[in-house]
Image (cartoon, rainbow, N blue to C red):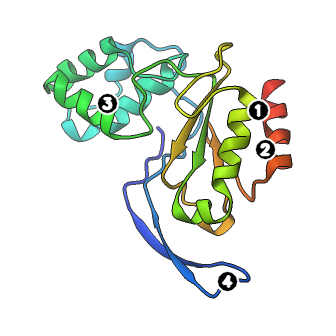
Amino acid sequence: MAAVFHCIIQIFITFPNAKETALCTVIPVRFCKPNPYGNMSTKEILDKFEARQDNLLMILHALQDNHPQNYLTEEALSDAAKYLKLTKSSVYGVAKYYSMFSLKPRGKYIIRVCVSPVCELMKGKEVLAQLEETLGIIAGETTPCGRFSLEIAECLGQCQEAPSMMINDKVFNHLDSKKVNEVISKYRHK
């Protein structure tokens, strides 16, 4: 089953050649193992979990990971609500609140770019601009071919190695224009 971090950590970062220290709040980020659910049906996935409300996040992750377009369908949300004896609106609210869930289809490769204050100081916005230019889309969009989706993340917990981005579950640090192009080129040919 996928591991989910449930904590918020604050750390202090001192930048080289800087006289200031920044406080970085590390927001929970899900780093998971490959999808263990294969091509299971929604019912089969739900049956893997006890029908307890505290399983909602893990159920939503499992349902999203199982969908070929990496998102939660209306049907999946309804089925999860019914299984856990919750209202559909409460399940929808949870899915809408957490940025790691999507309610619209996404690409095969989900690129999350960190825009935390630390990454911003280390030129994270330039990384985002480079990706938008290279992919021909802006944050929140998916390439027409369905290969890449570009999203922003408030923090990836990689402050010490900023700027950072994730592609699905793989983290890339110390990014610059050259490294971004190399990474995207590899994923285009996967």
Q: Give whichever of discs 2 and 3 has the lower sequence position.
A: 3
Measure the alpha-carbon separation of dots 3 and 1.
Answer: 41 Å
Residue type of the residue flagged with mark 1: Thr
Q: Give whichever of discs 3 and 1 has the lower sequence position.
A: 3
Look at the picture and state if 6 lies above or below 147.
below
Q: Give whichever of discs 3 and 4 has the lower sequence position.
A: 4
Residue type of the residue flagged with mark 2: Val
Residue type of the residue flagged with mark 4: Ala
Q: Which residue is mark 1?
A: 134
Residue 49 tag number: 3
Q: Residues within 10 Å of mark 1 (few under 14, many from 20)?
A: few
Look at the picture and state if 99 lies above or below 146.
below
Q: Are marks 1 and 2 in contact (CB under 8 Å)?
A: yes
Residue 148 drawn at (x, y percent): 66, 25
Depth check, front residue: 137 or 53: 137
Measure the alpha-carbon separation of dots 2 and 4.
Answer: 25 Å
Measure the alpha-carbon separation of dots 2 and 3.
Answer: 39 Å
Q: Which mark's residue is nearer the viewer, 2 or 3?
A: 2
Q: Are marks 2 and 3 in contact (CB under 8 Å)?
A: no
| Snapshot quadrant of residue 59 | top left
Q: Which mark's residue is nearer the viewer, 2 or 4?
A: 4
Residue 18 tag number: 4
Secondary structure at badge 2 equals helix
Residue 88 tag number: none
